Amino acid sequence: MDAGHTLYLVLDSDRSNPLFRSPITEPKNILDLGTGPGTWAVDVADQFPTANVYGVDLAPPVNTWLPPNCNLQVDDALSEWTWRVKFDLIHMRLMLGAFTDTEWDDIYQKCFDNLEPGGYVEQLEPDVQVMSDDGSLKPSSLLAGWGDNFVGSSERAGRSLDTHKTMKAKIEAAGFVDVQEHLYKSPIGIWPKDKLLKDAGRINHVHWSSGLEGFAMFLLTRFGAPKPWTADEVRAYTSKVREELKAPNLHIWHYTRRVWGRKP
């Protein structure tokens, strides 16, 4: 997950603030939903030392050192929110598959209700479909079928992985205005000629290679087709995908979408 965090910093490294695009300059309170290891929350707390930054996740935080203005907590975003403050920014990232369709509606409504007027919600999500522009990704490869395999499993689980396609409309439906989006082509590997994209691809290769088993184990052992897979089958599958990722002539990428909108 830290590799994923670094990837997005690199993709936006030409911006003065690569951590988010919401146009807020002097935030007082910021919330990071699904904070994971808390890396984003810690970086934002360092950048805005006068702001109070909160990160929540179902799992206990792994960071043992935090800036004095950063607080990481164990909480369930689907439960009643009991914050005593309104936020200037609520941030989410890599939350695809976290909620059902109706639960997403509830989350965006909670975000709207707990923001200050003029506050922003911002979300960044990748696509699980791996693509190539030059035919180097063979249709028979495991990587070419990776996305369909996972989208199918997520649909059987009732928690779609197409969040990057649906979040803009849902954010607008919750009442946010001036909703904007930015679509990235995130390379996997060092094949791009552009230096920035080459750096991003190198980091994304680490992100994918180190995360394959973690991405796959839950979904495939519970909702894999034609029946749930065994853990050993998942390990064998991800090992073969990891070998495919090493091919030097593979020019592959996936979409990543960032969406941000303002509460009137």
Image: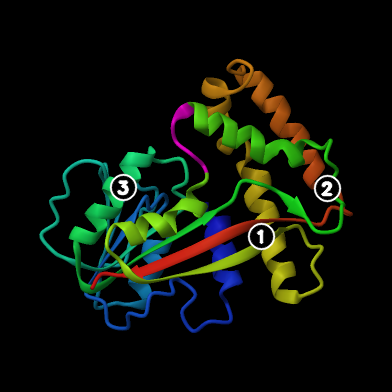
Q: Earlier in the sequence, mark 3 or mark 2?
A: 3
Mark 2 and mark 1 residues within 8 Å of each other at the beta carbon: no
Residue 32 x, y percent position in the rendering: 33, 58
Judging from the image, what secondary structure is the residue with disc 3 in?
helix
Residue occupied by mark 3:
105
Q: Is residue 233 left or right of residue 194?
A: left
Name the secondary structure under disc 2: loop
Query: What span is in magenta?
Result: 157-161
Amino acid type of the residue that numbered disc 2 sits on in the rendered structure: Leu
- Whole-percent x and y of residue 201? 71, 62
Compared across the picture, whether 18 is left or right of 48 comes to: right
Q: Amino acid at mark 3?
A: Asp
Q: Where is residue 61 shown, x and y percent of the image?
A: 35, 48
Name the amino acid type tagged 1: Ile
Q: Residue at x 31, y 47 (%)?
A: 105
Please name the residue that numbered disc 2 is placed on.
137
Task: Determine which residue is flagged by label 1.
Answer: 203
Whichever of labels 3 and 1 marks the residue nearer the N terminus, that label is 3
- SS category of the residue bearing label 1: helix
The image quadrant that residue 54 belongs to is bottom left
Pointer 3 with pointer 2, Cβ within 8 A: no
Q: Who's the residue at 68% across and 20% down the image?
A: 233
Nearer-N-terminus badge (2/1):
2
